[in-house]
């Protein structure tokens, strides 16, 4: 089973490490305790949307980018678990054509 908090923590940790930044630096800039940030990165704590935004701000990283990477990881895990191919988008209902447009044609 995929844990969203684990995937979020993994993405945040990878981004921080790619920037060669320490937990101490990021926690100070995000105004969150070092211990709590560590727990978020290890998937032990659920980050609120406000906390997640603060951490992303401290990393100079758009929240949408983090969520996109998390989404990809979850999709990958689902493919492995179910054996289903990756679905690029949700199915779209067919468009309905107004009777007045059909009559005009």
Image (tube, rainbow, N blue to C red):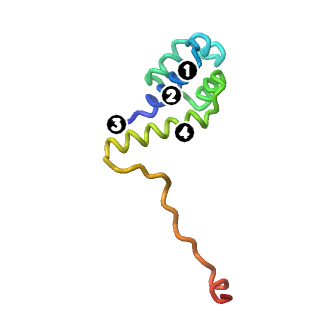
Dot 1 falls on a residue whose secondary structure is: helix
Mark nearest the camera among 4 and 3 is 4
Label 3: how many Cα within 10 Å (few below 14, some 14–19, many 20+): few
**Residue at which label 4 appears:** 68
**Rendered residue at 37%/50% (across/down):** 85
- Give the quadrant of the C terminus: bottom right
**Residue at which label 1 appears:** 18
**Residue at which label 3 appears:** 1
Distance (Cα) linking label 2 and label 4: 10 Å
Instruction: Pinpoint residue 64: horizontal percent, then vertical percent.
Output: 61, 37
Distance (Cα) linking label 1 and label 4: 17 Å
Distance (Cα) linking label 3 and label 2: 17 Å
Is tag 3's residue or tag 2's residue first in the polypeptide sequence?
3
**Vertical position of residue 49 compared to residue 20: above or below:** below
Dot 3 falls on a residue whose secondary structure is: loop
The circle drawn on residue 64 is none
Residue 6, picture quadrant: top left
The circle drawn on residue 11 is 2
Count the numbered circles shown. 4
Mark nearest the camera among 1 and 3 is 1
Dot 4 falls on a residue whose secondary structure is: helix
**Rendered residue at 59%/28% (across/down):** 52
Contact, mark 4 vs mark 3 (Cβ under 8 Å): no
**Rendered residue at 55%/12% (across/down):** 34
């Amino acid at each position: 089973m995929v844990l969203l908090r684990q995937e979020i923590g993994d993405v945040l940790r990878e981004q921080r490490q790619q920037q060669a930044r320490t937990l101490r630096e990021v926690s100070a800039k995000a105004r969150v305790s070092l211990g709590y940030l560590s727990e978020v990165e290890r998937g032990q704590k659920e980050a609120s949307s406000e906390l997640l935004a603060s951490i992303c701000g401290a990393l100079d990283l758009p929240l949408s980018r983090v969520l996109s990477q998390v989404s990809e990881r979850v999709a990958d895990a689902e493919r492995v678990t179910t054996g289903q191919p990756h679905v690029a988008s949700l199915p779209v209902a067919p468009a309905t054509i107004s009777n007045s447009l059909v009559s005009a044609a």
